[in-house]
Image: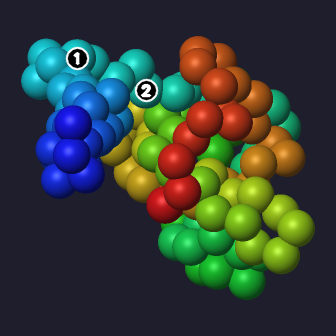
Amino acid sequence: MNIRNFGLLALVLAFLFSAAGVQTPAHAAVTPVTARVTVYRLSMRVDAGVRAARLAVLKQNDILTVLGQKKVGRVVWYKVQTASNQSGWVISTYIAAKSGSLKGVPAA
């Protein structure tokens, strides 16, 4: 086998065994991560950070769908959606995973 054919074979094999060659079925569902509020009252804000304007005050045991995360300084904030479809940011300290894992939430 000459160098040219070897290069072509290596390219084909790399494609077949790479993530680019693996297709996720269109019907594969991603299970959303849900969390519950663990404190009596929790401010949901327009952006991540304590200086951002408050959108709403959530109650203990409210269930949230977690949409993304962002680190501000050393603190993780989660972008969430309430049962009434309102979206905003909450500090990670005061929510706990209900289904799924908060560690796997993508950056927002």
The residue at 52%/72% (across/down) is 46
Q: Secondary structure at mark 1?
A: loop
Q: Nearer the viewer, residue 8 or 38?
A: 8
Depicted 79 relative to depicted 82: above or below: below
Give left or right: position of 27 versus 11.
left
The residue at 21%/36% (across/down) is 1
Q: Position of residue 83 (x, y in %)?
A: 41, 33
Q: Position of residue 73 (x, y in %)?
A: 83, 76
**Quick check: marks 2 and 1 in contact, CB under 8 Å?**
no
**Comparing marks 2 and 1, which lies closer to the viewer?**
1
Q: Is residue 62 visible?
A: no
Q: Position of residue 25 (x, y in %)?
A: 16, 19
Residue furthest front in the image? 2
Q: Position of residue 33 (x, y in %)?
A: 52, 27
Amino acid type indicated by mark 2 = Pro
The residue at 84%/38% (across/down) is 39
Residue on which the image places disc 1: 28
Q: CA distance from mark 2 to mark 1?
A: 13 Å
Residue 95: name its quadrant.
top right
Depicted 105 relative to depicted 30: above or below: below
Give left or right: position of 89 versus 94.
left
Q: Nearer the viewer, residue 14 or 10?
A: 10
Q: Nearer the viewer, residue 32 or 8?
A: 8
Give left or right: position of 83 versus 106.
left
Q: Is residue 39 visible?
A: yes
Residue 54: name its quadrant.
bottom right
Q: Which mark is residue 32?
A: 2
Snapshot colouring: rainbow
